[in-house]
């Protein structure tokens, strides 16, 4: 359980307050109407995944406006601007509308009930500035402690929905997060072959769902770990997956006890 915060007496929801739980005092709370209760009872609906997105909009303010618009129907838990400003649109205990169809590891559907969604203001084609990354790291640290989320369950939207999503994109610095234990990153020294059956076996061990095509999964793997790679499956793809499957197999490390 978190050390500080407010357990709301009537609805029994954990309410994270600005200035507490690692969240900055300057955090703006702007509740979105696009939310509801998480579905299912624990352990089914346990919060165990964090999904990182980019907004693909001109400004953070425009993204917040859209994520709070009833007609749009979408939302997320946190929005972080390029300069590190942060908004909370949905309480962590509630279900936000950010993930859509897809899955990760043992979770095949309704990722919204299992996850926290963080939107980073970015068009997808420029690096994520340091103040934004610093705020993300601060929020991730709190979330992972609060909900006991392992680093292999901090993923991109493209990881859980390889057939239709490409955020947070090739400019996002996963390696920086991994150095702090806030995500996972492969060892570049690993070696591998280019066998397709091995590829699917390894991607499943890492967390990619079997429901997606070889092409979509390869695209998602490269987007995250080898954004420079082109063409058919190659040994380098297998190498990074082999290392990841060995060191960070999803849902198998018994972290949640
Ligand atoms: Zn997204």
Image (cartoon, rainbow, N blue to C red):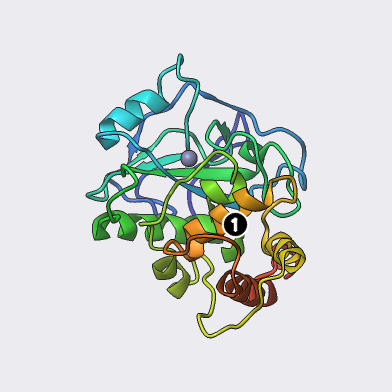
Q: Residue at position x 42%, y 51% from top?
A: 169
Q: Which quarter of the image is occupied by the N terminus?
A: bottom right
Query: Could you tell whether 109 is left or right of 55 in the image?
Result: right
Q: Residue at position x 57%, y 51% from top?
A: 159
Q: Determine if residue 2 is in view.
A: no
Residue 10 vertical placement versus 80 (above, below): above
Task: Describe the element under mark 1 as helix, strand or loop.
Answer: helix
Residue 63 vertical placement versus 102 (above, below): above
Return the residue at label 1: 218
The total number of labels drawn is 1
Q: Residue at position x 74%, y 44% from top?
A: 108
Query: Could you tell whether 171 is left or right of 105 in the image?
Result: left
Q: Which quarter of the image is occupied by the C terminus?
A: bottom right
Decide which of 178, 231 is in the foreground and name it: 231
Q: Residue at position x 40%, y 51% from top?
A: 20
Q: Residue furthest bottom?
A: 189
């Amino acid at each position: 359980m978190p050390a500080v915060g407010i357990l709301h007496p009537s609805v029994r929801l954990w309410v994270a307050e600005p200035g507490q739980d690692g969240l900055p005092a300057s955090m703006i709370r702007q509740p979105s109407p696009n939310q509801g209760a998480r579905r299912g009872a624990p352990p089914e609906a346990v919060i165990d995944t964090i999904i990182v997105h980019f907004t693909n909009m001109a400004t953070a303010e425009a993204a917040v406006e859209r994520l709070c618009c009833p007609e749009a129907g979408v939302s997320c838990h946190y929005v972080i601007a390029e300069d590190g400003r942060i908004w909370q649109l949905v309480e962590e205990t509630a279900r936000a509308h950010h993930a859509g169809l897809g899955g990760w590891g043992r979770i095949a559907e309704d990722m919204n009930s299992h996850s926290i969604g963080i939107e980073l203001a970015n068009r997808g084609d420029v690096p994520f500035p340091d103040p934004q990354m610093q705020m993300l790291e601060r929020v991730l640290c709190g979330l992972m402690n609060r909900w006991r989320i392992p680093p292999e369950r901090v993923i991109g939207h493209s990881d859980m929905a390889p057939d239709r999503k490409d955020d947070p994109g090739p400019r996002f610095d996963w390696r920086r997060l991994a150095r702090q234990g806030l995500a996972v990153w492969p060892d570049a020294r690993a070696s591998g072959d280019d066998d397709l059956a091995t590829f699917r076996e390894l991607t499943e061990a890492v967390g990619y769902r079997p429901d997606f095509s070889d092409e979509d999964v390869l695209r998602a793997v490269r987007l995250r770990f080898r954004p420079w790679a082109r063409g058919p499956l190659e040994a380098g793809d297998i190498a990074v997956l082999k290392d990841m499957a060995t060191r960070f197999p999803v849902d198998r490390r018994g972290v949640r006890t």
